């Protein structure tokens, strides 16, 4: 493997919290430090940003069952072009990833087709139906990094507590979708004046708080390791803060869409803006941004959810929820940088370091010995997004035709370049 030497790079180090010009050497797929190396291939970064590759928790790849929406090949290409070096994939496939055999199929397909690292999550209950616990121990042995039923909330608290108790005994991480399912059923918007004026079925933001309250009580009872996939309301943030202050093993994430968009964006009934949970008020959006900056919310993810044209070309209430985000994650996040809400090391703490720590990975760092999973990007280059230029099979992005800033120039996984903007 060729040794690399990145020179004149603006090094974004989330572990040290620094943003400085420097040099970074790569040897045998790992970071060797800021020293020069004889015979290394020199890459002049021209003052552009070099950071750890993004670790994206909650990516849906529609294999098996819906390969026309997204395959490991197309998702992997989109991830590489978006600076994502590790995809942590969801089990909400057809069938659900709830047995070691299905998990083995997924791992094999990912290794064959994706140029980036793929870490699969498995279902918490069989078929994600919330009735019977999946084979958590066997699935861990087969390579599952976490367990989740995604947006299919386990309504039976006794079943959920049994799953959490067993997961705690194995040290398994449970990823949950904190929503009260009865209130959330059929909702297309967040309740309030705007939803009422538009005539959209809505859900109170308290549904998220109620779901999190239930989950935190079970975590306290069982001692399980817990990650909330998306916290999007100010009311839920207060409950999250209390749980962390109490010493519970709890982390939380938020999607890029809930950090950069709000409920007013659905005003023209464009179904690309229909996501789950629904977009929130501007006050909730700003509270989530502040929570990321402070570290209360640990992780930012794309929550990449591909949907085909037919499922989105429906009235807003009937259209499928979800938006793609692998390629748009980085430029969308630059909105928070350019608006002054946070700096790049803070942002990369949530994009790379925190998810790596939660999953027990060595990535997310620029320290010697860490894997050479890197992204080189220009945070300032402007462009207008054309969804048809995206590499995902599905094109359901809410940023279509939006003016954006930030472009990935190169992505490396284990010291091997998997994306080069100049040749794309």
Image (tube, helix red, strand yellow):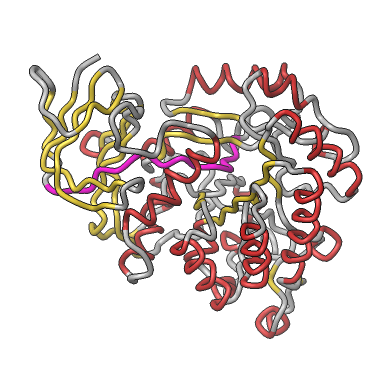
Magenta segment's dominant SS is strand
- Name the residue located 17 percent from the left edge and 34 percent from the top edge: 34
Residue 141's quadrant in the figure? top right
- x then y, percent, for residue 113: 48, 22
- x then y, percent, for residue 128: 80, 38
**Quadrant (top left/top right/bottom left/bottom right) for the C terminus:** top left
Residue 334's quadrant in the figure? bottom left
- Name the residue located 50 percent from the left edge and 54 percent from the top edge: 397
Q: Would residue 209 be visible to someone looking at this image?
A: yes
Extent of the magenta region: 47-61
- Name the residue located 77 percent from the left edge and 51 percent from the top edge: 220
Q: Would residue 267 be visible to someone looking at this image?
A: no
Report the front residue among 106 and 196: 106
Residue at the left extreme? 38
- Name the residue located 72 percent from the left edge and 41 percent from the top edge: 224
Residue 60 forms part of the magenta stretch: yes
- x then y, percent, for residue 183: 83, 65
Report the front residue among 296 and 198: 296
Q: In the displayed structure, does residue 97 sit left or right of residue 293? A: right
Up the image or down, 33 lies above or below 236; here it is above
**Quadrant (top left/top right/bottom left/bottom right) for the N terminus:** top left
Instruction: Count the marks.
Output: 0
- x then y, percent, for residue 166: 80, 32
Residue 205's quadrant in the figure? bottom right
Residue 35 forms part of the magenta stretch: no
Q: In the displayed structure, does residue 148 sit left or right of residue 257? A: right
């Amino acid at each position: 493997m060729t040794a690399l030497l990145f020179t004149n790079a603006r090094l974004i180090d989330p572990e040290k919290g620094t943003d400085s010009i420097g040099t970074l050497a790569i040897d045998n797929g790992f970071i060797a430090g800021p020293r020069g190396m004889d015979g290394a291939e020199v890459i002049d970064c021209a003052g552009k940003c070099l950071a750890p590759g993004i670790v994206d928790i909650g990516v849906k790849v529609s294999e098996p069952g819906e390969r026309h929406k997204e395959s490991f090949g197309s998702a992997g290409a989109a991830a590489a072009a978006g600076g994502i070096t590790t995809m942590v994939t969801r089990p909400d496939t057809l069938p659900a990833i709830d047995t070691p055999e299905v998990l083995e199929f997924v791992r094999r397909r990912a290794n064959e087709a994706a140029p980036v690292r793929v870490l699969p999550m498995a279902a918490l209950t069989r078929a994600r139906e919330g009735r019977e616990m999946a084979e958590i121990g066997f699935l861990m042995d087969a390579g599952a990094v976490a367990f989740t039923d995604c947006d299919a909330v386990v309504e039976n608290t006794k079943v959920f507590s049994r799953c959490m108790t067993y997961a705690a005994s194995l040290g398994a991480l449970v990823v949950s979708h904190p929503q009260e399912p009865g209130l959330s059923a059929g909702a297309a918007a967040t309740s309030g004046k705007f939803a009422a004026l538009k005539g959209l079925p809505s859900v109170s933001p308290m549904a998220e708080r109620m779901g999190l309250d239930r989950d935190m009580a079970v975590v306290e009872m069982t001692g399980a390791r817990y990650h909330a996939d998306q916290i999007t309301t100010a009311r839920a943030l207060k409950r999250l803060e209390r749980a962390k202050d109490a010493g519970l093993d709890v982390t939380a994430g938020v999607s890029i869409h809930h950090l950069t968009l709000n409920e007013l964006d659905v005003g023209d009934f464009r179904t690309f803006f229909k996501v789950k949970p629904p977009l929130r008020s501007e006050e909730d959006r700003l509270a989530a941004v502040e929570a990321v900056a402070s570290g209360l919310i640990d992780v930012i993810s794309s929550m990449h959810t591909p949907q085909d044209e037919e499922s989105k070309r429906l009235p807003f209430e009937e259209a499928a929820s979800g938006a793609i985000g692998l390629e748009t994650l980085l430029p969308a996040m630059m909105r928070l940088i350019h608006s002054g809400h946070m700096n790049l090391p803070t942002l990369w703490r949530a994009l790379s370091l925190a998810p790596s720590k939660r999953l027990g990975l060595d990535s997310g760092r620029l320290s010697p010995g860490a894997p050479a999973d890197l992204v080189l990007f220009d945070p300032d280059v402007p462009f207008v997004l054309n969804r048809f230029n995206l590499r995902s099979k599905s094109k359901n992005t809410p940023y279509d035709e939006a003016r954006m800033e930030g472009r990935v120039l190169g992505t490396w996984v284990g010291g091997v370049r998997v994306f080069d903007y100049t040749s794309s």
